[in-house]
Amino acid sequence: MKSSGAQIHPVLIILVILVAVVLAGCISSEKTGTDSGTLSIQKPGNETVRIGAIYNLEGSEATFDVPSMQGAKLAVKEINLQGGIKGKPLELVLINGKSNTSAVVAGAHELAGSGTIPVIIGLSNPDHALPAARAAASQNVYFVTSGATSPRLPQQVPGYLYLACMGDNTQAAAGAEYAAGILKAKNAYILYESDKQYPTLLAGYFMTRFLELNGTVQKVDMFHSTDTGFSSQVANLSSLFPQPDIIFVSAEAWADAKPVIGEVRNAGFTMPIMGGDGYDAPMLLTGGAAGVDNVYFTTHTWFDPATTNKKQQDFMARYEQEYNSSAVPFAGLGYDTVMIVAEAVRSPGSPARFSEGMANITHYTGVTGNLTYTGNSHIPEKMVTLMKIQNSTLVHIGDFMPVKVPSP
């Protein structure tokens, strides 16, 4: 767990740095170079505690995975500066999945097959997290995804897969309850990116909860990631009577959603548009929301520069110093995932008892919020953050726990 902020004697700091220098090359290592993005993983002695990590550091998933990887590495650095895990340094063995399923699976097999890694973390896309976790489980190694939000994942790899983030059913329910309860939406038009698992599931959970709240779904429409125009969807929207009170655009990423939203707005539709955490890309902090208005999305947290949350303040400052960029929610997810895994390894005293350690994690206070694993659930109970893009600016609406969550 993170230090509470006690002062450390300068001599102790110097000693820690000297130890880190001696152990250089084993505290954090990245394996790249072959078609799978890996090299042979050497087995060390008993001087380190090792966890694997797979992140897509290039390609379509890098938007989410690079910040998450950076957050994870920052957590490892802090744990080691605080003495490691039971006196042993923590080593993060990192593999670049290159946004390629074959590379992700090969990396998972190699990490799991090392014989020294009890758990692997990473990935923000369920289409990659699922095959990676299955590969790890085939060698009795656990997988904790930092950002893949499909609540079906733990069922698909029974006993071996955990989420360190909220599930899509939770964030969709929070969005639907806000739409119906606060925005007073009665009618909805749902448009989703049908060739991706995440937006398909998210749209389904939103529709389920919205209907339970006596809302009406006037039409369910779809688009593909390769589409360059959305005239047919705009025509379908135009044909609805009455006009919907809200449009739910479920897309893999903000880069996929923004062209759709732009075409809808250019056609004259001004009602609220809502989406999920795929909208929450670093580019929103650097002008990526330009020209966008009245758009809501659910996400994992909000790193408000004016926050009074000391844990978030410290994380934001350290992340800025380490990477010369502002922290985004997926960076916080990577950080929290390492901290959770470290605590799960530490609490029962043995990496081999990892599942027991995860079951012991309750009321964990992370930089992305508080979470608890209850009963046999491999998905934490966690608040959902709701953001709004208003006049090209991000506005934090609040944090919500939905009243009812659709089953996976």
Image: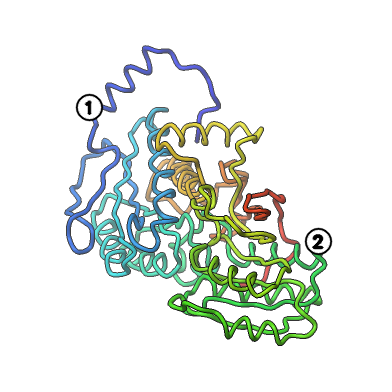
Could you say which is closer to the camera, residue 365 or residue 31? Answer: 31
Q: Residue at x 33, y 17 (%)?
A: 14
Q: Is residue 262 above or below residue 4?
A: below
Q: Which residue is under mark 2?
A: 182
Disc 1 or 2, which lies upstream in sequence? 1
| Residue 13 falls in image quadrant | top left
Number of residues whose C-alpha sits closer than 10 Å to that of mark 2, classed few (under 14), some (14–19) or many (20 or more): few
- Label 1 is placed on what type of residue? Val
Residue 54 is left or right of residue 405, and the answer is left
Quadrant including the C terminus: bottom right
Residue 297 is left or right of residue 321, and the answer is right
Number of residues whose C-alpha sits closer than 10 Å to that of mark 1, classed few (under 14), some (14–19) or many (20 or more): few
Q: Position of residue 197 (x, y in %)?
A: 49, 74
Q: Which residue is under mark 1?
A: 22
Could you say which is closer to the camera, residue 21 or residue 100? Answer: 100
| Residue 62 falls in image quadrant | bottom left
Q: Residue at x 47, y 75 (%)?
A: 196
Q: Secondary structure at mark 1?
A: helix
- Label 2 is placed on what type of residue? Ile
| Residue 346 falls in image quadrant | top left
Residue 79: tell me if it is visible: yes
Q: Position of residue 142 (x, y in %)?
A: 39, 58
Q: CA distance from mark 1 to mark 2?
A: 57 Å
Q: Secondary structure at mark 2?
A: loop
The circle drawn on residue 209 is none
